[in-house]
Image (cartoon, helix red, strand yellow):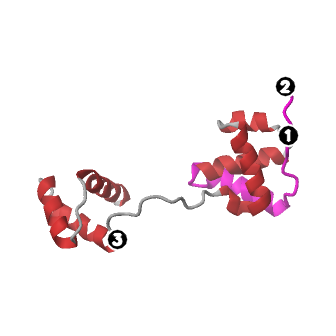
Amino acid sequence: MNMPNKFVTNLTTEDVTKLEQLWQTSSNFRVRNRSHAILLSYQRIAIDEIAKVCGVGRDAVSSWLDQWNRDGDEGLTDKAKSGRRPTLSEKETVEAIATALQVPQSPARQLAEIEKKTGKKISRGILKRLLKKTSLEAP
């Protein structure tokens, strides 16, 4: 069955340059993928082909094209999503990490000290994620 197509047609030279730069250098995979899709659409490549190249469904590509037409380059990034708020504030997170690093051998003691200092109880999983994130950010 032949599916209808839509194409991005209103790109300026600056848009093309910016999209190519984002496609080649953005640290965010989704922005790179969406930039590439917009460029392919501008070259009048069908949505089905773009979906194959980008490894997503036809509806996703169609949505990206609509977002580009509506929001421009701001439509390439993900919008903030709702979800559970962090248990600890940024200040409490820094304090929790410092406390945990002072007693590295005992997770139970780490959690007890963190609860004593912050007044908030966190799970071992949260503590593990905080420490893992810290070790990834360290040079």
- Expressed as whole percent of the image width and height from the top left, the position of residue 90 reads 35, 71
Do the CB atoms of the residues marked 1 and 2 lie less than 8 Å apart?
Answer: no
Q: Secondary structure at mark 3?
A: loop
In magenta segment, residue 20? yes
Callout 3 amino acid:
Ser
- Distance, label 2 to label 3, CA atoms, is 54 Å
Q: Is residue 139 visible?
A: no
Measure how far apart labels 1 and 2 are at the Cα level.
12 Å
**Residue at mark 2:** 1
Q: Which residue is mark 1?
A: 5
Give yes or no for contact between labels 3 and 1 (Cβ–Cβ under 8 Å): no
The amino acid type, in three-letter code, at marker 2 is Met
Give x and y (percent) for residue 29.
58, 48
Give the residue displayed 84% in from the left and 51% down from the top.
8
Q: Quadrant of the C terminus?
A: bottom left
Residue range highlighted in magenta:
1-29
Query: How far apart are labels 3 and 1 at the CA level?
Result: 47 Å
Q: Nearer the viewer, residue 51 or 136?
A: 51
Side of 113 relative to 66 (left or right):
left
User: Which residue is label 3 attached to?
Assistant: 89
Please report the residue visible at 85 percent of the width from the left and 44 percent of the height from the top.
6
What residue is at 72 percent from the left and 41 percent from the top?
59
Q: Is residue 18 above or below residue 53?
A: below
Q: Residue 26 at what x, y percent from top left? A: 61, 55
In magenta segment, residue 19: yes
